Image (tube, rainbow, N blue to C red):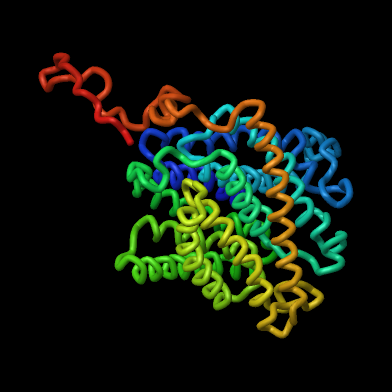
Amino acid sequence: MVCAGLVLLMTPGLAFFYGGMTRAKASLNMMMMSFISMGLIGVVWVLWGYSMTGGDGFAGIVGNPFADFGLYGAVNTEGLVGIGFGATFAIITVALISGAVADRAKFSTWCVFVPVWVTLVYCPMAFMVWGGGLLSADGAIGSVVGEAVDFAGGLVVHTAAGVAALVLALMMGKRAGFGVDPGHRPHNIPFVMLGATLLWFGWFGFNGGAATDVQTAGLIWVNTLAAPAAAMVGWMIVEVVRHGRPTSLGTASGIVAGLVAITPACAYVDPVGAVVIGAVAGAAAALAVNLKYKLGFDDSLDVVGVHLVAGIIGTVMIGLFGRPELVSEEGMAGLFYGGGLRLLLAQVVAVLFTIVFTGVMTAIIAFVLKAAMGLRVSAEEEERGVDLALHAESAYDYGLGTAYREDGGEAQAAEPTPAR
């Protein structure tokens, strides 16, 4: 229950992280996209979402949504704690995607996308990896190439969210002035730092909640400390080499990249392995975030560069650094511990499957929603700012409203300063 609470806190933390990275006139909308994910998925998970992640399932792809509809059969059972824990993972996974479409997404369309994507993409992925589906030991794919090893969500959460973010960014198109307008820079770095702090704090529950004994919990805790620490340093080194100075934004992003990378591996590698994974992920993500300018896609808040890249690195590197006594009872191990290529191959196949499945399904969902509702706001609404256009609110009043003199009388309000 404590770990579930920590993971739930991560979504408001993500809202601060993303909200600070956007323009001032879009920050509330960005935060709302995370908050509405909690509202919508909290309901979906109770009604049918959880049922789709376990049970007998259909063709090894997804569980029966009606097997325990409304959790009727789970009442008065110990399983409710695990069900609640699983809900928090679904919530933050879809919230992660929102960073790729900042400043321009229709909020109404997002409110439809969230439950549909969780139902058709997240729940099947959770079933295929954790619920006995295709990628598990007895699944059609896992039984051939080996079980996909993903302790806390390198595949199900971060790779899936990163691929979905890329698809939406491509289908939604670039923001006006992308790559040229300096107004697209983060408007509140302290919010970003606060968000990274809350994410790191909550991540100890994210990774540690599934531990089955104190030894495993201790290993996970240390690895969840070591990997983001090393990733932060790795990102900063890249910044110093490329630009001559480290940045606060890079420091916060490096922390998140390390957290992402250690998520699938936290119970399977030793602390030295965690340091290496974190350092590689931090440096790689620091380089990857600039690819959007070279390749021409507008991943607004670097979901692809951080979550997709670091998620793949952490998942695949289990095949190199997985300790035989930690990975499985059968002694399957990473390449550097004498395990050969079997585990590495299983991880690579699982990553490729996740990319293809998530990419295709997200593209279908986005195509239907684009035709039915439209994916992005009008050019005028984007220029005005989605906070005012979609929510009739502003994060900062900039002198709007009635001003008051020191003697208590009314004074003319100053003209507001336009928000970028």
Q: How many marks?
A: 0
Above or below 73: residue 413: above
- Where's residue 215, x and y in %? 64, 71
The residue at the point 28 percent across, 30 percent down is: 418
Asked if residue 357 is positioned above or below residue 106 in the image, the reply reads below
Find residue 354 and report its horizontal and vertical position in percent: 71, 55
Above or below, comparing residue 2 to residue 330 in the picture:
above
Judge from the rendering whether residue 77 lies leftward or rightward of residue 168; answer left or right.
right
- The answer to whether residue 106 of the structure is visible from this angle is yes
Q: Nearer the viewer, residue 25 or 37?
A: 25
Could you say where residue 161 lies in the image, as x and y percent from the top left? 62, 49
Residue positioned 86% across, 59% down in the render = 139
| Residue drawn 74% across the image and 78% down it | 341
Q: Is 32 located above or below residue 295 in the figure?
A: above
Q: Quadrant of the C terminus?
A: top left
Q: Quadrant of residue 178?
A: top left
Q: Is residue 187 visible?
A: no
Q: Identify the image quadrant of residue 235.
A: bottom left
> Who's the residue at 37% across and 66% down the image?
239
Instruction: Pick the residue in front: 155 or 288.
Output: 288
Farthest residue toward the bottom? Answer: 338
Residue 49 left/right relative to 218: right
Q: Where does residue 84 sit, x and y in percent of width and height? A: 68, 44
